[in-house]
Amino acid sequence: MSIQITIDGQPVATEAGHNLVDVAADNGVYIPTLCYLKGRPCLGTCRVCSVRVNGHVTAACSVPVADGMQVEVETAELADMRKALVEFLFVEGNHNCPSCEKSGRCELQDTGYELEMMVSRFPYRFPLRPREVVAEQLWLERDRCIFCQRCVEFIRDRKTDQKIFSIKGRGSTAQIEINAELANAMPPEQVRQAVDICPVGCILEKGVGFNDPIGQRKFEIQSVRERALGEKKK
């Protein structure tokens, strides 16, 4: 059913039930995301896509559009809120970008640049979460995990549908885990999928380091904003 909403005061014609992040992007409005993947069920774990809908702040990825919806995205308050969330993700882990194998292909790094983050306003925690190397093809740099849960929900054993990744513990004791037996049965393309679905450098393939040369990685070729809106780099 055709409906009309407004985004930052501008009328937008769309279809009822479509995801707000996608509707905004289709109409040239960028909403940053980290846990959301187009075409996949909403996770709503990172909240980096926070906007105001009908006067209430909410995660845009969790909102199906409805007729008459009033959406605010580009206000100073909301922009600072989203930037603060990204800053918090940086200090909550150990994201030493220059030495990370995912540098240049990291969505957190890319989003930090897009939101013009220069330094975090929060104190660094420098957590110590031991890396996990028990699986034959994959290893986990747990200090970089942002607990988006993409791997937990979307990477599963193809025969049993069991989860290969999981989150153990809560709060400051939480950490990503891997089922080594199921991980060892993953075909090569699923190993690559697991590495690629991780928005940071937490899930890495053993024996593979900086596999994309600087200058040809997606971060240098097209920003996260340009990718979200389908724009060509200027």
Image (cartoon, rainbow, N blue to C red):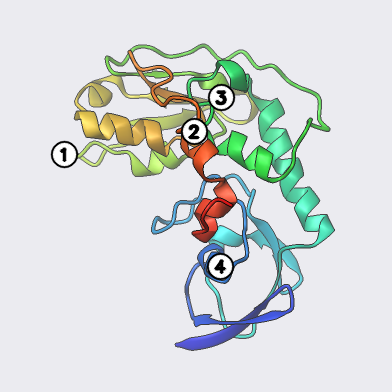
For marks 3 and 1 on the same chain, the one whose residue lies earlier in the sequence: 3
The image's mark for residue 105 is 2
Q: Work out whether 56 lies above or below 215.
A: below
For marks 2 and 3 on the same chain, the one whose residue lies earlier in the sequence: 2
Measured in 3D between alpha carbons, the distance from the residue under mark 3 to the one under mark 4, in whole angstroms, is 28 Å
Measured in 3D between alpha carbons, the distance from the residue under mark 3 to the one under mark 1, in whole angstroms, is 29 Å
**Nearer mark to the viewer, of 1 and 2:** 2
| Residue bearing mark 1 | 159
Check disc 4 and report its element: helix, strand or loop.
Answer: helix
Determine contact: label 3, label 1, CB under 8 Å.
Answer: no
For marks 4 and 1 on the same chain, the one whose residue lies earlier in the sequence: 4
Q: Work out whether 106 lies above or below 124.
A: below
Which of the pair 223/186 is nearer the observer?
Answer: 223
Determine contact: label 4, label 2, CB under 8 Å.
Answer: no
Relative to 219, 114 lies left or right: right
| Residue 104 horizontal/vertical position (percent) | 53, 30
**Nearer mark to the viewer, of 2 and 3:** 2
The disc labelled 3 sits on which kind of residue?
Answer: Arg
For marks 1 and 2 on the same chain, the one whose residue lies earlier in the sequence: 2
Measured in 3D between alpha carbons, the distance from the residue under mark 1 to the one under mark 2, in whole angstroms, is 30 Å
Determine contact: label 1, label 2, CB under 8 Å.
Answer: no
**Nearer mark to the viewer, of 4 and 2:** 2
Measured in 3D between alpha carbons, the distance from the residue under mark 4 to the one under mark 2, in whole angstroms, is 25 Å
Name the residue rendered at 50%, 41% in the picture: 221
Check disc 3 and report its element: helix, strand or loop.
Answer: helix
| Residue bearing mark 4 | 20
Determine contact: label 3, label 4, CB under 8 Å.
Answer: no
Measured in 3D between alpha carbons, the distance from the residue under mark 4 to the one under mark 1, in whole angstroms, is 34 Å
Label total for image: 4
For marks 4 and 2 on the same chain, the one whose residue lies earlier in the sequence: 4
- Most extreme residue toward the bottom is 2
Q: Determine if residue 33 is in view.
A: no
